[in-house]
Amino acid sequence: MNIEQLILIFSVLTIYSSFIKKIYKVKFSTPGKLNLGDVLSLFIITVISIILNNHFYYGALIIILTILWIDSLIMFCFGMKISLDNVKVFTQGVSTFKGEFKAVINLITRFHWMLAAYLFLISSLIYLDSGVNYFLIASIILLVFCLTKSKIKNIKSFLAWIVISILLMTLGKYVEESNVIYHALLIIFSLLSLDIIKFKRFLSLKSVFYGFLLGSSIKKGISTENNKHILDEILQSRMKESSTNKSEHFGKAKDFNVLLFTIESMSDEAFSDSPVARKITDSFTNRSEVQRFYSVSPNTNQSIMQLYTNEYGVNGTYNTLHELKKHGYDSLFISTQETKHFEMKTKLVDAGFDSIIDGEDLIDCTSSNDYRLLDNIDVISEKLKRGKAFIHVLNSQTHSRYSVENKDKFNRYKNTDDRGRYLNAVDEALDIVHTMLNKLKDDDVLKNTIVILTGDHGQSFGEEGYFTHSSATINQQVQIPLCIFNNDLPMTKADSANLLDLLPTVFDLLGVELDLNNKDGINFTNQERNYLLLYSETRGYNSPSNISVLRKGKKYYMDLLKYETRILDIDDGEISDYDLSKDEIRQIVFLAAEKHNILD
């Protein structure tokens, strides 16, 4: 390989990396310009190309840079990165992501230059490997397309680019290769010069390859007099230690049934927006006054773990249903989702459910989607009549990509818009719950039944650059509603609670004592915690990729994807006048994450 080829490959890699960083920047506050770390990484790759100048090297390079391109698109669409851990999770339920692929296709059809950037890379590397001049000309055409951020809108623009391509190919016959290389070098030198002049963070060593396939890691911060009191509270966890969930309300609903409705992906914001939610709360008095209710990790499987282990993370010990069974209760999980994905069924069996009915069992129902739950209302009613029943109902059509069956009735928002279709789907799901509750009321089985309505997590639509769920601790993903219905119950009050606390609180009413030693859940009617840990399901190298500690109206927030360390208020507003350094904030988050075993 000669010096001219080295110049070309360095130019190609630098230009391509620049485009990748611009894709990251579109939705995230990550730097969109090259830095010193990028230059060094690309230089090392270029040097390796001297040593390994063969087809296998270019094949490996294409694979690595293709993953980088896909990663940038997934970051753009969903706010999550490709990592070995995330790929492992993805493969457990790949069929549930079919609808999500449309978002990536839609992205490429909106921004043609993103696809052109990838084709520029492929064409350039083929030229470097084969020496066929037409691939070099194709690379120049694609580079011009990317730099101008063009789009093939119609037949006229298509024909225009055909003409431009023919002109460039014609000119290419009369331009010596050395001149092409000279201009490539000039372009890359100008690009780097602009970055050095304009970009204050050019000296950063975190390149576009930082955390490639492994993810970024969280490191310890520092402990000082400024954050010591917060760190001490984290070590203590609860304001008042209690070994069980017993309160003054213990046994007030002894031997009552429990009917738990979980609406997939329903945020508190979506619930508050829904007129159907108001129909439910007008018909059934809500006995829960929890100002802010959270899913500590915005993911369905995580919510199951939260409920039935009362512990953070995925390694907790299932205790709630096993204790309930000792008191003669029978448990049923019924869902329109297929529980074979993401090992959900295994988790439900381990949790202690006596019976599980899921989407595969409901395949022969005459109705479709969540209306299949109505086809099984008699099964639920019969169990409630027998007494001592614990029934957990989980729907599916509010999961992304959101499905609305009765579009004529549920059309407050445009069903062509993702967020609009989601809110319409929430309306429809709540309407199904409302119909079920009315039927059960007519069957006279709700008088001795505690009815709970909540979500497993929320859903985001671009806030802070995040979409769907599992990826962030912003309120749209972690804040969910909580309603507890039964007029014979005492009012349960709390400023803040979460899914870890739900069953310890409800079981107290049932007269079922839970051992809370070494558990993270509390009875929120008589206990308080010093802080709440929130974390994403998506992971970096050694931790969740997004972690927060919520304490006294402040959210100590870390985002490993965007390299952000911030303090937010209870509504996720930015707090700028704080006296903690980023290292001091990082130690607060690190200590809480370490204490609750969510670090690798």
Image (cartoon, rainbow, N blue to C red):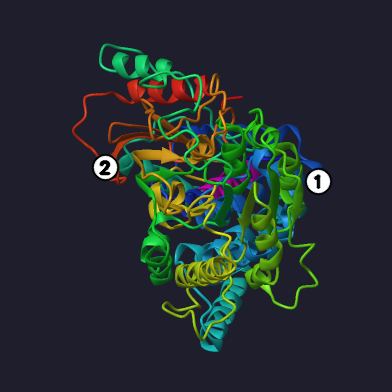
At x 79%, y 62%, the residue is 360
Circle 1: residue type: His
The image shows residue 570 at horizontal and vertical percentages of 30, 42
The one nearer the camera, 522 or 138, is 522
Which numbered marker is on residue 574? 2
Q: Indicate left or right for 458 with 554 as reference.
A: right
Q: Secondary structure at mark 2?
A: loop
Q: Are marks 2 and 1 in contact (CB under 8 Å)?
A: no
Q: Quadrant of the C terminus?
A: top right
Q: For residue 14: magenta?
A: yes
The image shows residue 221 at horizontal and vertical percentages of 40, 18
At x 66%, y 37%, the residue is 321
Q: For residue 30: magenta?
A: no
Q: Quadrant of the N terminus?
A: top right
- The secondary structure that dominates the magenta segment is helix
Numbered range of the magenta stretch: 5-17
- The answer to whether one can see residue 183 in this image is no
Q: Indicate left or right for 550 with 9 as reference.
A: left
At x 39%, y 28%, the residue is 527
At x 44%, y 67%, the residue is 148
Which numbered marker is on residue 588? none
Circle 2: residue type: Glu
Residue 572 higher or lower than 458, as above or below: above
Residue 290 higher or lower than 276, as above or below: above
The image shows residue 549 at horizontal and vertical percentages of 39, 31
Separation (CA) of disc 2 from disc 1? 51 Å
Image quadrant assignment for residue 579: top left
